[in-house]
Image (cartoon, rainbow, N blue to C red):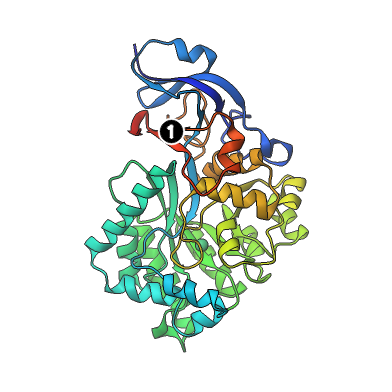
Amino acid sequence: MIDLVVRNASQILTCAETGVPAPLAGRSQGSIGLTSGGVAIDDGRILEVGPGAADIPARETLDAQGGVVLPGFVDPHTHLVFVGNRAQEFEERMKGVSYEEIAKRGGGIRASMAMLREATDEQLQSAVKRNLDRALALGTTTLEAKSGYGLSLEHERRSLRALAVDHPVEVVRTCLAAHAIPPEFEKNRQGYVDLVCDEILPAVAEEGLAQYCDVFCENGAFGFEESERILLRGKELGLRGRVHAEQLARSGGSRVACRAGAITADHLEHATYEDALAMKKAGVIAVLLPAANYVLDQERRAPARTMIGIGLPVALASDFNPGTAPTQSMPLVMNLACVRFKMTIAESIVAATINAACAAGVADRLGSLEAGKQADLVLCGVSDYRDLVYRFGGNPVRAVVKRGRVVKR
Ligand SMILES: [Zn+2]
């Protein structure tokens, strides 16, 4: 007798093609691995997927009620640890004030920094827990979370520690000390880059507070050389890079990502054909963030069709943050990726599961429904997978299984 069987699924999307933990690219970007029947689970792992699996005797049964079953969503780019909100900035922006102008007035990242520095450890932890609860309810079973509103050794450390909560959602931690220049270094950029390289990243690595290091490579944030220096320092310390790249302008972030051997380059609205080709050659995954593109109402769209056309693997993430993407819904992100970046429904599903798991560095265990993988899956209240992405604004997720345990029903 095994632990759990999921039965009666109209469609099961395995999002598995190769059997190896590699992202799906090019024509395979849309390989959702459609089957039906059930999923057999024992000891936290998947035993079998498909029609035969539904008949294996189990101690517990989860009835999919004719719905769609797919891997738990992986969200490979979030700024999950913050307090307060910036609804007021949203209101100002809707009156025509630009994001850059708001940042100049001390809003934006600096406003979140001020609120975070004021908050107690308990307040940070409860904010993290609340956000993880919401992610789980929306079907996200693993996510990458960045610090980056602390911008000092003490507060970056507090942020990363707050992300180490005991919660069913697995958290992959990234140090984004290079998110913005804090006000105390306003006239001494070099001093802050030194602090990041000489103190913050070494402490983070030493204490095992993060697995990755990220940098916001953009006009008004960190330049090409600064970004490269930070990423190479992180690499030296065992913190692999991730880059906020080519979002508001073509600032060279994707090139830095290639040179520093980063795992991903994210945003990429201004990435060119050459940038995409270089990323493919260097093995850098493209993480697209259509919710931020939507909130900023950017005319420029990430060139997803070019990327998929040349065989560069594309992942999707929420970019969950209080300024430009106050959403944690991966189904919504998938819808936005279809509408704004012209991805197909199947491509968006692969981008939010197996490719997202590759982007978070966890694809050896997660992101697809295959025998031997950890049993993380979601049951949706729709009978056709296309409905998952086509309908938007609600929550299609009815039940969530994490490590073989039903954590939402
Ligand atoms: Zn971001």
Picture residue at 47% right of the left edge, 89% below the top:
187
Tell me the amino acid under the disc marked 1: Asp
Q: Which residue shows up at 49% across the image and 78% down it?
A: 92
Picture coordinates of residue 209 (x, y %)? 35, 56
Classify 10 Å Cα crowding around label 1: few (below 14), some (14-19), many (20 and above). many
Residue marked by disc 1 = 376
Q: Position of residue 252 (x, y in %)?
A: 66, 68
Instruction: In the rendered view, tell whether residue 61 sits above or below residue 405.
Output: above
Q: Is residue 97 visible?
A: yes
Q: Is residue 170 above or below residue 365?
A: below
Classify the position of the C terminus by image quarter. top left
> Horizontal placement of 314 versus 396: left or right?
right
Quadrant in which the N terminus appears:
top left
The residue depicted at 42 percent of the width and 29 percent of the height is: 375
Q: Quadrant of residue 260?
A: bottom right
Residue drawn at x 35%, y 67% is 156
Among the 4 quarters of the image, the one containing residue 83 = bottom left
Q: Is residue 295 above or below residue 338?
A: below
> Left or right: where does residue 302 sit relative to residue 170?
right
**Pick the front one: 251 or 232:** 251
Q: Is residue 168 left or right of residue 48?
A: left
